[in-house]
Amino acid sequence: MSLRLGLCCIFIQEPIRFRSLTAKALLALPPAARRARIDAVCRHNAESLVAAIQAVIRLGIEAFRILSPLLPRITHPQVGYRLEDLPSATAIRQAFSQVRDLAKAHDIRLSFHPDQFVVPASPNPAVRENSLRELTYHGWLADLLGAEVINLHAGGAYGDPAAALTRFAAVFRDLPEAVRTRLTVENDDRVFSPRQLLPLTEATGIPLVYDVHHHRCLPDDLSIDEATALAAATWAGREPYCHISSPLHPWGSGDPKPHADFIDPADVPCSWLSRSMTVDVEAKAKELAVLQLQRDLERLPNEHPCPSPLRPTDLR
DNA sequence: GCATGTCAAGTTGTG
DNA sequence: CACAACTTGACATGC
């Protein structure tokens, strides 16, 4: 099989859970208790990440997206902290090294997908500054963990998509190297289609992560096969990343954007089957959905309808 | 126990 | 104009 399937962030059946912390709860604690709380959660999450990689290896899943708040609130202006200041810093660093070594030994691709608050193209300088701080954290963590990709949406258009992409490119050039070498952009389901992002990728060399479900929600003049090929070319020889998901509500009956528990194999574009790509599976049933899609893809291509419909247009 | 509201942060489209 | 959705869930609170 040429498609490398990836799991996003969490498990539904495996007994692996990540903990979180809110700034509000931390602010209510005296300094010593606050530090102890942060330490416990960070250590738990670092050890859970080791367990996650071990589970992924055991299950035959070949890529894993690491949840961004692995070290919760580390960049928060009030309750932020440094790893070195935690009592368990050494143990946490050792766990991160173990993750890096395991992933390398078993050829597991690791990525990040920072959340919606990271908007380098915002016209608001404070938002850009927060985004820079958050991306710098991701680059630092990616170095420690051996993660290869930090994937972002391009953000808002503010009525002028071209100007927004120009701001994005300007911010990109000033990012720390640990971020610049890993950053990718993904087409989203309401603002930037693949066609709109291609000029940015050409101007900057940023690879394009192609999300076929978003493309079906926000189509452009490109067919799915054309977008797949153009996105793959932006990876300059690296293995491309793509995203797949199926709509919770069937096409034509309600909002297509929410994700279903599992992937309908018919939603996998036919042309993907003959490519070498990493495909992150965005499905609510998490590892169960990845494993089911693996099984379904083994049955394919015999039963797969090829050529698949040239969605987005055919489905609408 | 369990249900419910809340949690740093942005942006857009819907009702 | 408030609010949900986004890739998404865990924690605190109150019964």
Image (cartoon, coloured by chain):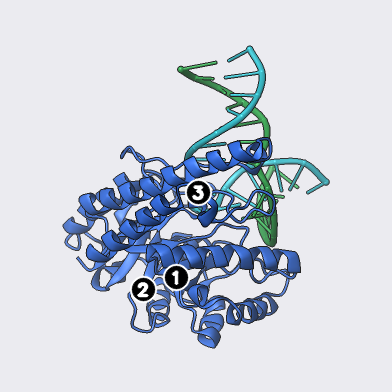
Chain colours: A blue, B green, C cyan
Q: Residue drawn 33% across and 83% down?
A: A237
Circles 2 and 1, Cβ within 8 Å, touching? The answer is yes
Which of pointers 3 and 2 lies earlier in the amino acid sequence? 2
Q: Secondary structure at mark 2?
A: loop
In this rendering, would A132 be left or right of A250? Answer: right
What residue is disc 1 on?
A209
Q: Amino acid at mark 2?
A: Pro
Whether callout 3 and callout 2 share a subunit is answered: yes
- The percent coordinates of residue A255 (x first, y second) are 54, 49
Q: Amino acid at mark 1?
A: Val
Whether callout 2 and callout 1 share a subunit is answered: yes
Q: Secondary structure at mark 3?
A: loop
- The percent coordinates of residue A124 (x first, y second) are 75, 67
Q: Amino acid at mark 3?
A: Pro
Check the image and report above or below for A24 versus A306.
above
Q: Chain of mark 1?
A: A
Front one among B12 and A11: A11
Give the CA distance from mark 3 to mark 1: 19 Å
Mark 1 crowdedness (10 Å alpha carbons): few <14, some 14-19, many ≥20: many
What residue is disc 2 on?
A240
Instruction: Identify the disc placed on residue A258.
Output: 3
Q: Secondary structure at mark 1?
A: strand
Whether callout 3 and callout 1 share a subunit is answered: yes
